Image (tube, rainbow, N blue to C red):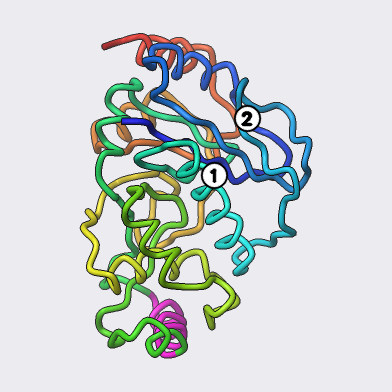
Amino acid sequence: MKLGFCFLVKEGLNHVSLWESFLRPAPPGSVGIYVHAKTPTPWPVLNGAWIDPAPLETAWGERSLVAATQRLFVAAINDGCDAMVLLSGDMLPLHPFAWIQSFCSQTRLALQPRHGLSERQVRANAERFAQIALYFGLSVDQLRKQNMFFVIQREAISRIIKSASVDDFPLLQLADEYYWINHLIRIGAEWERSNVVFCNSDPTRTQAEVMQLTPALLESCRNNNYGFIRKITSLDDQVRVHLQAIYESV
């Protein structure tokens, strides 16, 4: 299986040396790297990466992020990828390549829970679900909200792209958290609710919090089978050594 790592970034990737260590055990032909940035010349990036030569203008939460994500997926499909995982530039894998490759052999998304939400969250979801229900041809009860970063299989994304246009999506704000999951539901694709990315200690929140990766946080995320962690601004030497050992393990 060829896995496409699709990076949606501002100017470049953080922690490039750790990503290089993670990818080193990958068998030849099993990985593709794809980058959409706010510039056609992002830096730093991983060697051999495809870089979108004419990137879209994107803004936080807007529909433009969905369009940029779709560009990454199309590039990965055209390069022969069987599955794609959407990533940010501040994200790190938490397991060896073989584990991540197996994890990404199914479409996986993290969803906002239905219970335990604040009144504001319930009201905001209801308003957005009402806006998009007709577009998807689904009842409001069927609609869900996802974490932005997720794993998707080639067949599922191909069906979505062929049957829908991002430009027609009625939601302009936070479109990235309502688009893909509800298209998967619409087409009846197989997917699993999973701990794809650790981004916030509060499971009701889909917005990432800035974090320092500590040994305790690393152990907790791995024990809970998270594939990745994001918004990592710093990590100490002990954690760096631990991650290097994880990436080198079989």
**172 and 224: which is toward the camera:** 172
Residue 155 image point, x, y percent: 32, 53
Q: Which residues are magenta?
A: 118-130
Secondary structure of residue under mark 2? loop
**Picture layout, residue 20 above or below residue 33:** above
Question: Pointer 1: what residue?
Answer: 75
**203 and 51: which is toward the camera:** 51
Badge 2 or badge 1: first in the primary sequence:
2
Residue type at mark 1 is: Ala
Question: Pointer 2: what residue?
Answer: 14
Q: Is residue 62 magenta?
A: no
Q: What residue lies at 64% left-to-right and 61% top-to-bottom? A: 60
Residue 122 image point, x, y percent: 38, 81
Residue type at mark 2 is: Asn
Left or right side of 61 for 246: left
Left or right side of 182 for 165: right
Query: Which one is in front in this view, the residue at disc 2 or the one at disc 1?
Result: 1
Q: What residue lies at 69% left-to-right and 45% top-to-bottom? A: 37
**Picture layout, residue 189 above or below residue 122:** above
Quarter of the image for the C terminus: give it.
Answer: top left
Q: What residue lies at 53% left-to-right and 12% top-to-bottom? A: 237
**Picture layout, residue 185 above or below residue 16:** below
Quarter of the image for the N terminus: give it.
Answer: top left
Residue 144 image point, x, y percent: 33, 72
Secondary structure of residue under mark 1? helix
Give the crowd class for mark 2: few <14, some 14-19, many >=20 residues within 10 Å: many
**Picture layout, residue 122 above or below residue 199:** below
- Magenta part mainly helix, strand or loop? helix
Residue 91 image point, x, y percent: 51, 36
**2 and 116: which is toward the camera:** 2
Left or right side of 142 for 67: right
